Image: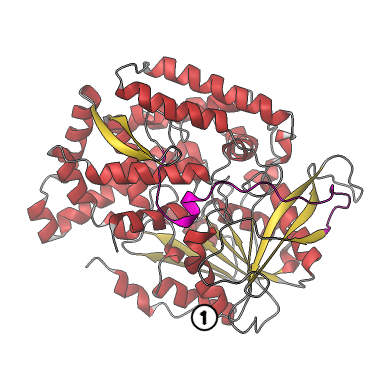
Amino acid sequence: MNLFRLILLVLFVPSLASCGSTSPAQTGETAGTSPAAETAPMAPAILPPPQTPGEYLPAACRFTLPQDLVEGVDVECGYLTVPEQRSTTSVHTGRLIRLAVAIFHPPGGAVYPDPVIFLTGGPGFSAMEAMYYQFEALSEAPHAAGRDLLVFDQRGIGLSQPALDCPGYDHFALESLRLQAEGQALDDQQMLEITLEQLSLCRDALAGIADLSAYHTAASAADVNDLRLALGYEQINLWGGSYGSRLALEVMRRYPQTLRSVILDAIYPPDVDLYVSAPANFHRSLERMFASCAENPVCDQSHPNLRQVFYDTVARLNTQPVVREIWEPNSGEEIQVKLDGNTLIGLTFQLLYDSKIRYLLPKYIAAANQGDFTAFDRIREAILIRQKYSSRGMMFSVQCHEEIAFSSLDDFQKEAAKYPELASFYQQSILGMLTYRVCESWGAGAADESANQPVYSDIPTLLFSGEFDPITPPSWGAHTASTLENAYHYEFPGVGHGASALSGCPRQMMVEFLGNPGRPPDDACIASLLDP
């Protein structure tokens, strides 16, 4: 499997879009040559105006179908109408919105009536627009367990209507990359202010078509239940990765009687502070990578003093950035971009997500130290694909409403200062100061205090954590499991962000668990995942 194919795997498994994104000065977005990447965006589905909350209308699939799937046989699509603003009463008034839905049937049809509903990460990542890439990874376990796989774009995302996209900001991000390469780069403060201005323009545009305070996890949890009711399922199984695990936990909190079982991967519990914890979590992952290389005689001999080599390379690039040429997917052209030390940190963060690429990181870091940045160019290109499938406005609405509302910029700054090698990276990162500033005026409102509390449940729950995960550490999985009576938590050695993206052991355990959620699956296969 080549590097680009591996990069696609990491970009299209469940992930926190906010975690992988940084300011335009730090990353770009990229491309591939698959049918999904080359196909122009489809026009919105033409449906009659939404009239009734809870109404489900079959419709044509609006995404590139995975290979060999036949619409109407292997997959059926439609739209669910839900109220934009969720009311505490049974009477819904105001604007109605639509959620894009796809139901994938296993060969020969489902054996059991309870489907697996997949909840994608981000928040803001479109599961359906990226389905061409991720169908095999998503469908294998549910179909092997004899169940339909149901995928939908959460409110404000992708093919759902409206989608809270920020195309003007995305264009600005790309233009800023070009300006940097041409020696016209702004300083950090200027870049931050212009970025905030662009996102403010996006907020104003989105406020004309949506109530930005209505796009949050509690509302999406109600959407999941409405989807269950509309399609006539008595019970469902949930599978949520990264932010999707946060959404699954909220469904567990609010609609426990509807759930047969739950699978949580790369667990993001509601009672943690994602932003204040981010520098320590990333630092932990980096240190584990450095230690892993030092503990391996072959790696240690080939790449001695890896930690020092990495931070020396970062410091040199921050002092003397280099100009690189990468492929830009929207134009299909090669463009020149600047690579500085903070960008290298952000790209390393992305590479730590993937369990296969992670083993190659020492080699890539050593090559970068010698002036060969090819691997980092490729990941930078691949990140550009992800932006095509991310609704940035939805991400800000969710995070401002229920994460930043319970966080503190002062606490974040104090925590970031504990890691001086990473501190400047976080100052303009979406996972750092930028989001605090955006949320000051985004208009997302603040969640109820209950959104910041742990979930207590006796629903059978399978939890996966990755040893090297740079954003949702294994300790978060253990913490979440501590309040779930029937929880089975497993840490996978050598794995990054999203164990269920791996074929073999994790999916075998998922199939066994779906077959009998009342007992822990056989975990003997985990030993096979130890470092080669």
Colour scheme used in the picture?
A: secondary structure
Question: Compared with residue 13, is residue 165 higher up or lower down, i.e. above or below?
Answer: above
The answer to whether residue 521 is visible is: yes
Residue at position x 75%, y 54% in the image: 222
Q: Position of residue 420 (x, y in %)?
A: 30, 29
Residue type marked 1 = Glu
Q: Tell which residue pokes out farthest to the left in this image.
A: 301
In the picture as drawn, the residue positioned furthest to the right comes out as 91
Q: Residue at x 61, y 52 (%)?
A: 454
Residue at the disc numbered 1: 512
Residue 101 pos. (x, y %): 68, 59
Crowd rating for badge 1 (residues with CA inside 10 Å; few <14, some 14–19, many 20+): some
In reply to whether residue 35 is colored magenta, the answer given is: yes
Residue 186 against residue 124 in the figure, above or below: above
State which quadrant residue 65 falls in: bottom right
Q: Nearer the viewer, residue 102 or 407?
A: 102
Looking at the rendered image, the quarter that the N terminus falls into is: bottom left
